[in-house]
Image: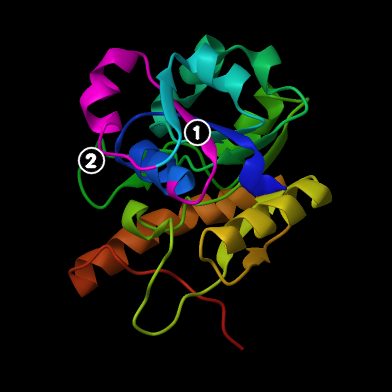
Amino acid sequence: MAAKEKVGILGSGVVGKQLASGFAKHGYDVMIGSRDPAKLEAWKKQVKGKLATGTFADTATFGSIVILATIGTGTDSAIDLAGVGNFAGKLVLDATNPLDFSHGMPPGLWVGTTDSLGERVQRKLPNAKVVKCFNTVGNTRMIDPKFSEGTPPMLICGNDAAAKKETAEILRELGWPAAFDVGDMSGARWLEALVPLWVRAAQALNTYEHAFKVVR
């Protein structure tokens, strides 16, 4: 069962730390990877549950599930450092976004509409089962989310139906009511494009603790 699986998280920024502590809290055996694992020692002592630190290669090898929580522009190099072969056959949850802050706020995208970072990840990891997940919500709402108007399903996409089913099960364990599948990995173009709009909504609402929901 997913709760017994090992989870490797690449990226030690606020997103990586939030996911690592959240998965550990929910009973997963977690390793968080960094270019400099030593810098995580003080933070690690504050986390409840099974949590280890390591290099990107250590972490990708460790996890039967691997999560990409790197900054968008650093994703390619992080995968190279982790070793492409260490992802083979695994579920890879891609929480990255190709945000472009070169012109300030709100951000744009440095890839989009005809390609996506999610698709680039899947091409780079052809033997992995990549699912776009977590990228459309703020890091404080990724685990055990609470919204005053109700928690929506998490928006996901990917090419492998079984991987998306497993992702939906994991999300339910982490407090999400369900997953909303928008199709194959080309859907990442639009999930990623949603994020600059999410930032604009945050500026209008004066909060980053919101999410989009499909209604009918």
> Picture coordinates of residue 214 (x, y %)?
56, 77
Mark 2 against mark 1, which lies toward the viewer?
1
Tell me the residue at 78%/25% (across/down). 127
Q: Secondary structure at mark 1?
A: strand
For residue 172: magenta? Answer: no
Q: Which residue is mark 1?
A: 30
Q: Position of residue 11 (x, y in %)?
A: 40, 29
Q: Is residue 32 inside the magenta stretch?
A: yes
Q: Is residue 108 above or below residue 50?
A: below
Which residue does the image show at 68% across and 32% down from the upper left?
122
- Whether residue 140 appears in this view of the structure is yes
- Horizontally, residue 76 falls left or right of residue 92, namely left
Q: Estimate how packed mark 1 is, as few (under 14), some (14 to 19) or many (20 or more) residues with alpha carbons within 10 Å.
A: many
* Residue type highlighted by circle 1: Val
Magenta extent: 25-48
Residue type beneath disc 2: His
Q: Position of residue 59 (x, y in %)?
A: 52, 20
